[in-house]
Image (tube, coloured by chain):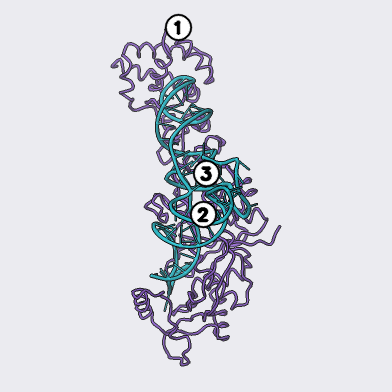
Chain colours: A purple, B cyan
Amino acid sequence: MSDLRVRFAPSPTGYLHVGGARTALFNWLLARKQGGTFILRIEDTDVERSTRESVDAILQGMEWLGLDWDEGPFYQSDSFPLYREYVQRLLAEGKAYRCYCSAAELEARRELAMREGRKPKYDGTCRDRSDHPDAPSVVRFRTPQGGEVAFNDLIKGRIAFPAEELDDLIIQRTDGTPTYNFCVVIDDATMKITTVIRGDDHVNNTPRQIQLYQALGFPVPEFAHVPMILGSDKARLSKRHGATSVMAYRDMGFLPEALINYLVRLGWSHGDDEIFSREEMIQRFDIGSVGRSAGVFNPDKLLWLNAHYIKAGDPERLADLLMPHLTRRGVVISNGPVLATVVKTLQERAQTLEEMAERALFYYQAPQGYDETALAKFDGDHLAKVFQVVAEKLSTTQAGTATEFDAIFKDICAENAWKMPQVGQPLRIALSGGTQAPGIGEIVETLGREESVRRIRVLSNVIAGV
RNA sequence: GUCCCCUUCGUCUAGCCCGGCCCAGGACACCGCCCUUUCACGGCGGCGACACCGGUUCAAAUCCGGUAGGGGACGCCA
């Protein structure tokens, strides 16, 4: 056990995306490695955009990935009174003040500053006013001026900002609700977070948060800013690069362990290792080994990892995970082969569960049509002969395993002076409708002799024009 | 515009802190060959990078300086 306390703090304005998932993963990994505490906090201070659906989607994503939290989920919206209290305190101590500038005025000044090439920061209009007009106001933090604010980032090293860069940020809106930068500080402090691991896009917020910690008399935690994830064009990853939602990957037939493995290697490495079990990840993870530069999301590598985990996966579990993909295709498996045995014949041939479902279809639905061009490579007489011989052999044999069936097909080849492809291809077409399928011995074993013979006779009749 | 960050194969990265073992290693993708009962799996091989310029040094991917490029932030969003 250690006193390390980390948190993942998403805002519920959408689903859990891969970037957030990776941040959550790094937090989780560090907590598990050090025996610390992983806290889940929902940052819903933006009442306008936060939704219950998003919260559910995020929790669902976390659960699917197996990122379990020790405390929470906590909702910032439950702590509004607490934030108010701290705002009052800063106000009373003169560390914050009321600002009566309207949003429109501010916007205009920002634009002007921008156009004149100046930093668009708040000009301090209300910083020292002593009147108290009866008008709507926000509360601003009186940020300390002079010197620099620096911190030692666990990933990026020392980062320093001149204090002049920091303006008086709003900590409480006109409607009385607190703003993000203020809430995180209060929450991280009261939740005794020791290490803040979050996205790169927060580095600029860090110095102002540090000033807030100091003004409030809280100890400053450590920070680790993880680089962003980019799309193939090196722009921030977004929907136009493909799926970004964690759950979308589940629906596309990815295994959670594949996504996790992919994500942990995006920005972090341990020598030349590529495959990590959950335990290995926890054992080897080290926040200091996270790279400093942004990384491009590479779907091909994810696919490769997924194929790896499908190959290595337990057929029973895979069968369970495959079910929804089959159901979506209207497949009823009750009258067909046991799904786990079907899975075994497909594990080496599918990169995703979706692909596996597609390839599994023929086991449960006899071919409605046949690959004509593949069939055309053989003449009718040959086909008729092969089907006749095989059907006969199959209906009389005692064989039951793929190996035994394959031996039978070899014998048939020898007896008739046929090459294996001359027998294998026609059979595959009769059994599955096409040429891309498992070995014929495997198919016969899982389909069963009876059904196999039936399918062979059906094609045989089709060819004979019956 | 200002501030902050980043820069090794197409991509993820090892190496960089503690210069020589690196004419730079692994993985994905791609190409070729092999295996083969189709499709895959697998095996073997190939292609392919230290952003640029200068400095320090006997020696630099590794240290220093600059340039360029990319990204992020600048909100009564988080």
In this view, A8 is above or below A401: below
**Given the image, what chain letter belongs to the residue carrying mark 2?**
A
> Three-letter amino acid code at disc 3?
Ala
Q: Closest to the observer: A456 or A140? A: A140
Residue drawn at point x = 34 percent, y = 28 percent: A368
| Rendered image quadrant of residue A327 | top left
Label ID, residue A415:
1
Considering every residue shown, the one lying at the far left of the view is A465
In the picture, measured across the screen, residue A23 lies left or right of residue A237, that is: right
Neighbourhood count class around disc 3 (C-alpha, 10 Å): few under 14, some 14–19, many 20 upward:
many
Circle 2 sits on which residue? Answer: A21
Q: Position of residue A200 (x, y in %)?
A: 50, 61
* Mark 3 element type: helix
Circle 3 sits on which residue? Answer: A258
**Given the image, what chain letter belongs to the residue carrying mark 1?**
A
Marks 3 and 2, the one that precedes in the sequence = 2
- Do badges 1 and 2 share one subunit? yes
Q: Position of residue A72 (x, y in %)?
A: 59, 62
